[in-house]
Image (spheres, grey):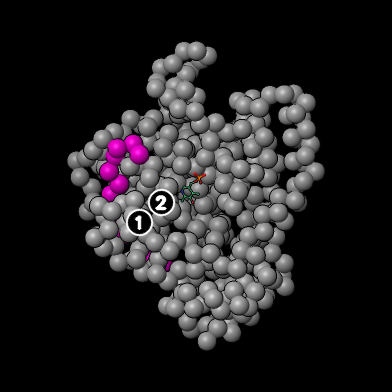
Amino acid sequence: MIKFLDLEKINSRFRDEIDSRIKTILDKGWYLQGEENEIFAQNFAKFCGTKYCIGVANGLDAINLIIRAYGFKEGDEIIVPSNTYIATILAISENGCKPVLVEPDINTYNINPDLIEEKITPKTKAIMVVHLYGQAVKMDKVWEIAKKYNLKVIEDSAQAHGAGVNVGGKLKRVGNLSDASAFSFYPGKNLGCMGDGGCVTTNDEELFKKVKAIANYGSDRKYHHIYKGVNSRLDEIQAAVLDVKLKYLDEDNKKRREISKYYIENIKNDKIILPLSHSELDSEAFQHSHVWHVFAVRTDNRDEFQKYLADNGIQTIIHYPTPPHKQEAYREWNHLSYPISEEIHRTIISIPISPVMTDEEVKKVVEVVNGYK
Ligand SMILES: *Cc1c(COP(=O)(O)O)cnc(C)c1O
């Protein structure tokens, strides 16, 4: 069986380094808000190109804390893609704000910037983009609209650690393409820890201080509470694991790009829609803009295709079978229609991609996919 993602294999490559960092923590007996958090936050901020990074408990908290720290409240509207993992939207509604859904571009699966402006009202406070499946959103238009209407731009970068766009000939990474960005370090992400974890990156000093305080019981110094805060911390052990793995992230993403290139060049089946065209392969954008968190293809008889792959020893996952507006949790939206999102959710399926796949496994996936009739 070719696993969708072999986490044991992914992390065992770093066993010695992780063991030694965890031993240091055991020896010191310091488990929260210590040196490991400081080191990782510094290194991850440097990696993203931002001034600040704060480790938090998970990706959902990271989005939540950004919204809370900006002071968005009941009735404020935040623009968000209709095609995303539900966490993005949950964080908005949890703060009492209204998620305003915008359809994606069917080719990139990311928010369609041309559809944003018509959704802006006097209540709009921010545009939240999601770099879905690992592909950086084309930000120019988003920035332009945000500037025109004086809106904050927030990134949900949970699926795109290390991806970047070309800004004036320089690589600018996700996490540094907005006012504030949320990351998740859930084990299966491109940069994943061994449990839950997340962080916020920003260049905004005030936001940095506020997120840091709110995440720590609203406290800016010990036993002094300026906000009704929460407890959202990144454990020292998780910070250490992430700091080890961060050094290999670019290399791992490169491997993902090589596999995706092989898939795009070699999968030849009329029934399968690939995520990127051949002509896009050699472009500058392909080099950096996509880190292939998942390799999602589309096909009409998705369930039949999934069964065929399973019968032939290939594990797949569907990201995601039901769009947020059709979920029971958002009953009030169930009658609404977002046809592009719905089409994506009806047809999408992710085939294996990971930095530890062997050449034989990659070839086998192509052979099996090409044999689907
Ligand atoms: C994983 C993910 C999250 C949530 O991260 P957690 O760490 O699981 O809370 C948020 N947004 C997107 C797009 C994700 O993929």
Disc 1 residue lies near ligand 1 with CB under 8 A: no
> What amino acid is found at the position of numbered circle 2 in the picture?
Ile
* Image x and y of residue 344, in percent: 39, 67
- Residue lying at 27% horizontally and 58% vertically, measured from the top left: 334
Confirm whether the magenta stretch covers residue 98: yes
* Image x and y of residue 274, in percent: 50, 73
| Marks 1, 2: nearer the viewer | 1
- Residue 86: give its label: 2
Whole-Å distance between the Cαs marked 1 and 2? 9 Å
Camera-nearest residue between 54 and 116: 54
In magenta, the rendered stretch is 94-107
Count of marks placed on residues: 2
* Image x and y of residue 302, in percent: 46, 74
N-terminal-most mark, 1 or 2: 2
Disc 2 residue lies near ligand 1 with CB under 8 A: no
Q: Which residue position holds label 1? A: 327
> What amino acid is found at the position of numbered circle 1 in the picture?
Gln
Residue 103 visible? The answer is yes
Confirm whether the magenta stretch covers residue 315: no
- Which quadrant would residue 40 be assigned to in this image? top right
Q: Give the farthest residue toward the front.
A: 328
Camera-nearest residue between 32 and 298: 32
Question: Which secondary structure, mark 1?
Answer: loop
Residue 101 visible? The answer is no
- Residue lying at 57% horizontally and 41% vertically, measured from the top left: 196
Mark 1 neighbour density, 10 Å: few (under 14) some (14–19) many (20 or more): few
Height in image: 114 above or below 48? below
Question: Which secondary structure, mark 2?
Answer: helix
* Image x and y of residue 85, in percent: 43, 53
On screen, residue 248 versus residue 27, left or right, reads left
Camera-nearest residue between 334 and 20: 334
Contact? badges 1 and 2 (CB < 8 Å): yes
